Amino acid sequence: MKRSEFIDGLKEVLQREENLSEDMALKDIGEWDSLAVMSFIAFCDEHFSTQINGENIQQCKTVSDLIDLAKDHLED
Amino acid sequence: MFSFDHSHIFLVTGAGTGIGRATAMSINALGGTVVGVARDENRLQSVRKSCEKPDRFYTQSLDLTNNLDDLPHWMRSLCKKYGKFKGMVLCAGIQQIIPLAALSISQAKELFDINFFAVLALCKGFCDRRVNIGKGSSIVFISSIASITGNSGIIAYSASKGAMNASVRSMAVEMAMQGIRVNAVLPGFVETEMIEKWKNVYDAAYIEKMRKKYPLGLGLPEDVANLCCFLLSEKARWITGQEFVIDGGGSLG
């Protein structure tokens, strides 16, 4: 999966109309709530067969940080 | 009493016949806009013509089981066409009367596809923030009294409706954050076309037996439609995750 596809996937997870950019702060994204976190974990499990740790997600401050969690599965 | 505004858009599945038809027409009569879904476009057009406000009734002919995974995307496309939905009533379903000895798993799966998995997929579509209006949204499942009582020949049917009831409670909790209410209506024996389809089973003698069993007599689709409209309305704003039996007292005896 390309980084851009990952960001599109994240947009779907968030059910968001507006585009996301890598430097966006998660706290500024209204759709980023506890259900979105669960959906994000399910998204990574479905596409990368990897269980993202909830504590690691809590450390994330930006969209870019979320991408970093999946970077081993993403193409440059 | 309550009413709807023309900007209140409701999706009703199974809108071509029975409870779905009556619910779609009741919402329309109360002022709401309906997107009616059924397999048969001719039946939908007939419902449209019978509506008080035909210009507020849109038709979508579709077999919901054709591509279950695509239903959430289809809901988004409807939203782009008509606007965000305030509510949804899920009436589409089939009944099978097959004793366990004759029941095949593929028949049971076919039943679950329309009675439960299509419902789940439509709810996934509806609960997308881009599809519903948020606070004030309401989903009503048409379950059945068969989900909480016992009868021969309807094991798969009652299980599919039981699955629906169980999902209502968790869905209600999960969707409360978005302001979406979710409830199930469990009708008893209602005289609909589905009964007509099974008239070799539901013969005159059986219907007479049912009449005697129901203290308030057998129900009409409109009786169930009235409850659905109430649950869709703001008057039901504090009601979620519940099952409502509506059966003229039939389950009391």
Image: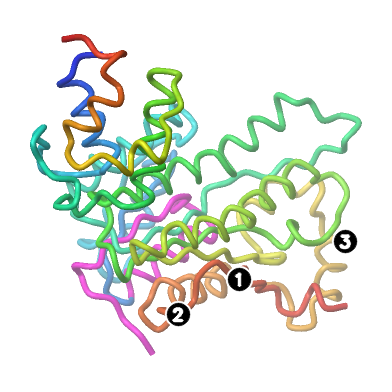
SS assignment at label 1: loop
Spatial CA distance of label 3 from label 1 is 19 Å
**Which quadrant holds residue B216?**
bottom right
Quadrant of the image containing the N terminus of chain B = bottom left
Name the kind of residue labelled 3 in the image: Ala
Residue at the extreme top of the image, as rendered: A75
For the magenta stretch, what is the residue range? B1-29
Name the kind of residue labelled 2 in the image: Trp
Residue ID for mark 1: B220
Q: Nearer the viewer, residue B42 or B184?
A: B184
Name the kind of residue labelled 1 in the image: Leu
User: Mark 2 or mark 1, which has the lower sequence index?
Assistant: 1
When the figure is inspected, residue B182 is found, relative to residue A8, above or below; the finding is below
Name the front one of labels 2 and 3: 2
Q: Which mark is residue B238?
A: 2
Residue ID for mark 3: B205
Tag 3, which chain?
Answer: B
x, y percentage for residue B242?
A: 58, 69
User: Mark 2 or mark 3, which has the lower sequence index?
Assistant: 3
SS assignment at label 2: loop
